[in-house]
Amino acid sequence: MPKVFNVQNFSTGDGKGIRTTVFLSGCNLHCPWCHNPECFNSKKEVSTEEIMEKILHDKAYYEMSGGGVTLSGGEPLLRFNECTELMETIKKQDLHISLDTALCVKIPDFDELTSLVDTFLVDLKTMDKEKMEFVIGGNLEQYCANVSELKKRNAEVVFRLPLIPGFNTDDKSIEENAAFINKYGYKASFHPFHRMGSSKYRELGLDYLYKDTPLLTKEEVAAIKAKYFALGVTEAEI
Ligand code: SF4
């Protein structure tokens, strides 16, 4: 059974249309700005039947809005084996599946993965090997190889760019990220840093390193996006 920390109906920021997002427990990274710290502790197992009941409750909305189901986390690919039954059941209902992933994991079977997922929402945090390794705990080579495997299979991919002040909003980061996006020809969505996870850190008794980090202003976000657009990046409509 999948280990899940939340099943959220009526999500609007996790892919196209109205969606139900299934948040799977656990992550192999440790982004200091993470707004889902509860993913690290929750080990609750939820049956496919129980998750499907929540998913099917909103089926009419998916059809009306072009939405579907998003598997998120944490890192949902860590639980891929636990989720294949769920994904197959979702597919039998003819529902669209998006997978929201940091893509920094070893993937044993890309063919199986791409046969079940319709759209990959792939985080693009940094192209800097040191930052990837020492700030968030990822492996840049593995990430790049995984993106390449998706491209080989013509998978539908949208890059999700978290805009994190002091981490990836400088010109060098923007140029490197844009070059990577353009290499693959995918579109990008932009996700400005927020502190909505602050109360979760307090409840869990954890220190939140970004608790005093100022939010980007609307003008700063617009300026960052304008730099990406000037470098040839196209915004995805999600
Ligand atoms: S990849 Fe996502 S869930 Fe994992 S630590 Fe980073 S922000 Fe949190």
Image (cartoon, rainbow, N blue to C red):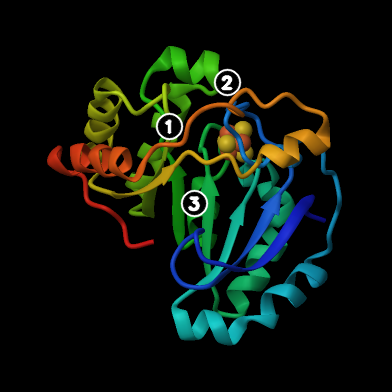
In the structure shown, which secondary structural element does the residue marked by tag 3 occupy? Answer: helix
Q: Are marks 1 and 2 in contact (CB under 8 Å)?
A: no
Earlier sequence position, callout 1 versus callout 2: 1
Residue at 77%, 51% in the rendered image: 5
User: For ligand 1, which image quadrant applies?
Assistant: top right
Q: Amino acid at mark 1?
A: Lys
Q: Nearer the viewer, residue 60 or 227?
A: 227
- The residue where tag 3 is placed is 111
Q: Nearer the viewer, residue 198 or 23?
A: 198
Q: Nearer the viewer, residue 114 or 210?
A: 210
Give residue 59's quadrant in the image. bottom right
Give residue 228's quadrant in the image. top left
- The residue where tag 2 is placed is 137
In the structure shown, which secondary structural element does the residue marked by tag 2 occupy? Answer: loop
Whether the residue under disc 1 has CB within 8 Å of ligand 1: yes
**Where 144 sits versus 185, above or below?**
above
- The residue where tag 1 is placed is 125
Q: Amino acid at mark 3?
A: Asp
In the structure shown, which secondary structural element does the residue marked by tag 1 occupy? Answer: loop
- The local crowd at label 2, few if under 14, some if 14 to 19, many if 20 or more residues have their Cα within 10 Å, is some
Earlier sequence position, callout 3 versus callout 1: 3
Residue at 26%, 44% in the rendered image: 222
Earlier sequence position, callout 3 versus callout 2: 3
Q: Nearer the viewer, residue 3 or 57?
A: 57
Residue 109 image point, x, y percent: 55, 45
137 sits to left or right of 232: right
Residue 122 image point, x, y percent: 45, 44
Residue 44 image point, x, y percent: 86, 50
